[in-house]
Amino acid sequence: MIALSPSAPPGVLTSEAHCADLCCYPTREQYFSLIESFKADDFEMCVDLCGVDYLEHPGRSLPQGVVRTRFEVVVNLLSLSKKQRVRVRVQAGDGEPEVASLFTLYPGTEAMEREAFDLFGVLFTDHPDLTRILMPEEWEGHPLRKDYGSGRVPVQFKEAPGPR
C-alpha cells in the first residue's frame, strides 16, 4: 500500500483497495485538497468519476470512522509515471448530495460530473456548466436513484398494411 502525500490533508482515512494501490475516504471538506495533493504528487490522470446510490445497502463495508451517507462519489486516479492507482470514495450526503468539482484540476471530469449530476442528482460546486448531459432538460428527477419510480412508456404499433 502506498502512503499519502505529505501535502494531503490530515486525518484522511485509508485502506487497501481491490484493483488499486490505495483507497482513501476523505470528508467532503478534505475531498478537493486530497485530490489536489494527488495531482501535485504526479497522478496525471483522472480515469473515472461516478456517483453511487447506496439506498438499498446502508450497512456496506467502510472503515471505522467513515460516516455513511446514501450517496457516494468515487474517483479513480492514475499515475502513469509511478504505475500506481488510487481510489477516492467521498460520502456526498443523503438528501441533497454535494461535493466540490474537480474541473480545475482535471478538466476531463467535466462530462463525468455532469453525468453524475444528471443521473444521481449529485451537485458539484464550482462546476462550469452543471446541466443535464443524457436526459432531456425538462426531465424530472434522476433516473439512477434507487427510489426513482420505474415507469413505462407506452409503445404504439401501427397495423401492417396488406396480407401477411
Image: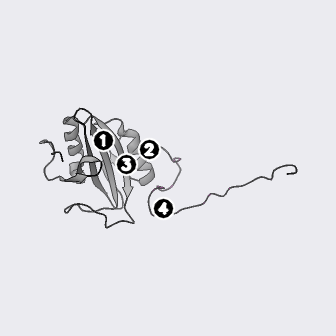
Tag 4 or tag 1, which sits nearer the N-term? 1
Kind of residue indicated by mark 3: Cys
Residue 147 painted magenta? yes
Question: For this rendering, which residue is in front, 67 or 140?
Answer: 67
Residue wearing tag 3: 50
Say few, some or many: other residues with alpha carbon within 10 Å of mark 4 (under 14 / 14 to 19 / 20 or more).
few
Instruction: Tell me what residue is drawn at x 27 percent, y 49 percent.
Output: 88
Q: Which residue is mark 1?
A: 102
Question: Could you tell whether 3 is left or right of 74 in the image?
Answer: left
Identify the main secondary structure in magenta. loop
> What span is in magenta?
135-159
Residue that mark 4 sits on: 148
- Sooner in the amino-acid sequence: mark 2 or mark 3: 3
Depicted 66 relative to depicted 103: above or below: below
Which is more N-terminal, label 1 or label 2?
Answer: 1
Name the spot of residue 4 as percent of width and height, x first.
Answer: 16, 45
